[in-house]
Image: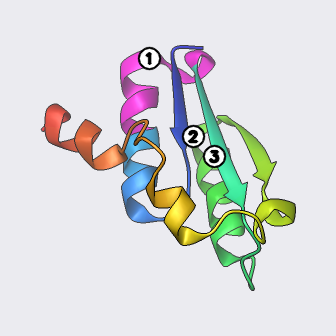
Amino acid sequence: MKALVLLSGGVDSATCLGLAVQKYGVADVSALSVYYGQTHSKELDAAQKIADFYGVALKRLDLQSYSKILTVRSWQSLPMIYHCKVMLNNFL
């Protein structure tokens, strides 16, 4: 695997997934969606449809059980690993 794309189901992450597949090929790209206790499944459903469209394996990470431990403040203190808009800016 050469690329792991955090796939939210939105336009930005879908575009990043497409760019990763274009650059590395479908065999070297995986996608990850995070369940953090959303009240609806639209995001995760959309992420699955996007991954299926590109033929990419989608892994799901369930963080719901940690939602009471991790507050917005603690998430903000984590270092940014990678953001799809950085990839878009570098690509365009």
Q: Quadrant of residue 42?
A: bottom right
| 27 falls in the magenta region | yes
Q: Position of residue 62 (x, y in %)?
A: 82, 55
Circle 1/circle 2 CB separation < 8 Å: no
Residue range corresponding to the magenta coloring: 18-28
Q: Which mark is residue 54?
A: 2
The image's mark for residue 65 is none
**Which residue type does callout 1 highlight?**
Tyr
Q: Name, please, the residue furthest toward the left.
A: 92
Instruction: Give the mark nearest the N terminus, 1 or 3.
Output: 1
Label 2 environment density (alpha carbons within 10 Å; few <14, some 14–19, many ≥20): some
Residue 51: image tag: 3
Q: Residues within 10 Å of mark 1 (few under 14, many from 20)?
A: few
Q: Are marks 2 and 3 in contact (CB under 8 Å)?
A: yes
Q: Position of residue 46 (x, y in %)?
A: 63, 66
Residue 71 visible in rendering: yes
- Compare residues 38 and 8 and report the one nearer the observer: 38
Q: Is residue 44 above or below residue 53?
A: below
Give the main secondary structure of the magenta stretch. helix
Write the residue at 24% across / 41% down: 86
Calculate the distance from the C-alpha at mark 1 to the C-alpha at mark 2: 12 Å
> Can you identify the residue that label 1 sits on?
24
Please, what is the three-letter code of the amino acid marked with disc 2? Tyr
Residue 66 x/y as whole percent: 80, 61
Viewed as shown, does residue 64 lie left or right of 44?
right
Is 28 placed left or right of 12 in the picture? right
Mark 1 or mark 2: name the one nearer the start of the chain.
1
Is there CB contact under 8 Å for labels 1 and 3? Answer: no
